[in-house]
Image: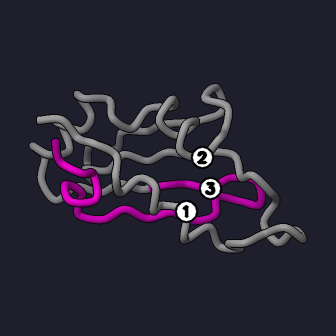
Amino acid sequence: MTRLGDAAHAIKSANAGASWITFDVVFADAETYQRACDAGVLNPGVFARLYRVDASEVRIFHCDPVLTIKATIPRATKAGGADETDFDGVQQFAPLLDVDLPG
């Protein structure tokens, strides 16, 4: 098994409006990207477990031209709210680093 953090070229997170966070997992080559897509390692269940959200609200997008898997999840709290700890959502990618990529 390979850690996603080692297999991906870049992993980032950011706000997608006040109520959503988006994740981009970018791969340097088509072979690794396709391996991740085929394995289904980034699926709603993984995001539900890692970020404690309802899997039915997770959106996954495979962006073949740019070798990127994107995911969008609801924020636990509104951006800028009194209990906000990451206003821009840029620190939320860290749990994805340890996701296992088979093969």
Residue 74 percent coordinates (x, y): 69, 46
Q: Looking at the figure, which quarter contains the C terminus?
A: top left
Instruction: Name the element at disc 3.
Output: strand
Image check: 49 left or right of 36? right
Query: Counting residues from the N terminus, which is met first, the one under dot 3 or under dot 2?
Result: 3
Residue 82: quarter of image: bottom right
Q: Looking at the figure, which quarter contains the N terminus?
A: top left
> For residue 21, which numbered disc appears in the image?
3
Q: Give the spatial CA distance, label 3 vs label 2.
A: 11 Å
Work out whether 15 lies above or below 88. above
Q: Residue at x 78, y 66 (%)?
A: 79
| Camera-nearest residue between 40 and 50 | 50
Magenta stretch contains residue 2? yes
Query: Counting residues from the N terminus, which is met first, the one under dot 3 or under dot 1?
Result: 3
Q: Are marks 2 and 1 in contact (CB under 8 Å)?
A: yes
Q: Are marks 3 and 1 in contact (CB under 8 Å)?
A: yes
The magenta stretch is: 1-23
Q: Residue at x 28, y 59 (%)?
A: 5
Instruction: Name the element at disc 2.
Output: helix
Label 1 sits on residue: 92
Q: Give the spatial CA distance, label 2 vs label 1.
A: 9 Å
Label 2 sits on residue: 51
Instruction: Name the element at disc 1.
Output: loop
